[in-house]
Image (tube, rainbow, N blue to C red):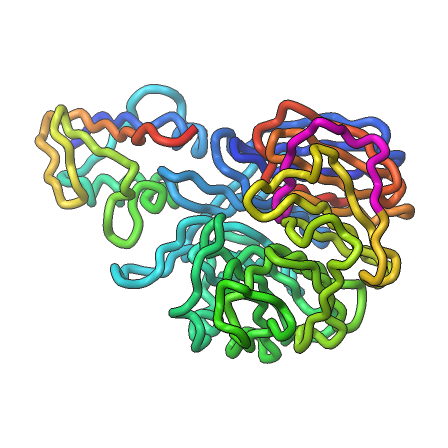
Amino acid sequence: MRVLVLVGTRKGGFVLEGDQARRSWQLRGPFFPGWEIRHITHDPRDRSLYAAANTLTYGALVGRSADLGATWTHSSEGLTYGKNDEGPKLKRVWHLKPGRQAGEVYAGVEEAGLFHSRDAGQSWQHLEGLRRHASTPTWEPGGGGLCLHTIVPHSTDPLRMWVGISAAGVFHTADGGSTWEAQNQGVLAPWRPEGSVTGQCVHKIAPAPSGDRIYQQNHVGIYRTDDGGRTWIDISAGLPSRFGFCMVAHPRDAESAWVLPLTGDDQRFVPDGQVAVWRTRDAGRTWRRTTAGLPSNAWVVVLRDGMHHDALDPLGLYFGTSTGQLFASRDEGESWAKIADHLPPIMSVAAALV
Amino acid sequence: VTHPVYLPRQLRDLYHIPAGPVQVEATCVADLLDALDGRWPGMAHRLSDASRLRPYVLFFAGEERCDLQSPLPPDAEVRIVPAVAGG
């Protein structure tokens, strides 16, 4: 068994391939050189990789590799909002998520919307139900754009799914995407009138391994829901900042999650120049800081898809900075080591076992 | 009429096309996109969206800048040039 760390950067995609001990790493890439790779994901059913590739000049596409990144095909057929000059424009693909069926993939895009492929990314269809939500005309972009950046299928119910949109909030469907409900109760949005149902600036949602628990890193706080998003509980107490982009939930322990706080929101680097990962083991009631192996005097940023985990035991964690360093932990975040450097700005990190 | 068409490097890389012009039969830019797309599926969407050339893609027939509806003079070389932007 090998561990792949899939790294999307502003100038192409890379793969770090490690042994099961996670001590030795080999870097491959770049693939799609010069393209901004917002996200790479692995579909374990057919061992394919999907990459969200974008350029200002040539638009957005989704790449697919059937050989773990050695060669790629690509398509953007159907990845468009069409010819309506007044309508939204598809600027980027931000996030990809394999669906339940073989060859099924979802894509979250900017301007915010959800697309679906049933043929392994060869063609795409817009799932129009989301943009029919009554709040759509009021959606405002976050600093990164009006993007659908996270897709979370329910662990058992094929009809249920959550998406995160900056800065519109979390939305949930219980009917396979035909209709959607905003689920932001309890989440602050100080730039909106009090009680606003949408307009929350979700940065990342991370589902716990079972049930209806989801963690959220928001622009203005860290939250947890235990009822599938109907209500959110503020779990920011004990952290040095309410601001950050990434959040990772343990795939086997619903009580454990990690964040990497940034000084918010006008500075957006790690507090005091000390890179630190914070873990909760009690669903956000308390947090513990880890800096072992992480640099000081380092004024770095980790973006919303910049941290991920593998599935080994103990869990491996990985994060990449917008200055091109990649860090790994083999012990669930207790200690860290830099496993790559001098990469282009890292936009996404995802780990897979192959 | 066949035109020599110079594609930008990033597109040649994407489709594994060797350096140098490709020969394409077309009478206008829209035809040219269709012909390119027939040989390299998806290329038209890299160069245009929603029935317009993408804003950072410039087409020249000889020394004349073209839009999607422009006819191509019979002897014109076509150069597709990405705008220089970004870091």
Horizontally, residue A185 falls left or right of residue A93, namely right
- Who is closer to the viewer here, A113 or A62? A113
Q: Quarter of the image holding residue A298?
A: top right
The structure residue drawn at horizontal position 64% and vertical position 44%, both measured from the top left corner, is A263
The structure residue drawn at horizontal position 45% and vertical position 56%, both measured from the top left corner, is A141
The structure residue drawn at horizontal position 23% and vertical position 27%, both measured from the top left corner, is B79
Name the spot of residue A237 as percent of width and height, x first. Answer: 77, 59
Horizontally, residue A88 falls left or right of residue B66, namely right
Q: Is residue A292 magenta?
A: yes
Q: Main secondary structure of the magenta part?
A: loop
Q: Which residues are magenta?
A: A289-305
Q: Is residue A75 magenta?
A: no
Name the spot of residue A197 as percent of width and height, x first. Answer: 53, 75
The structure residue drawn at horizontal position 58% and vertical position 58%, both measured from the top left corner, is A105
- Image quadrant for the N terminus of chain A? top right
On the question of residue B38 being in view, the answer is no
- Who is closer to the viewer here, A84 or B62? A84
Name the spot of residue A56 as percent of width and height, x first. Answer: 39, 39
- Image quadrant for the C terminus of chain A? top right
Horizontally, residue B63 falls left or right of residue A36, namely left
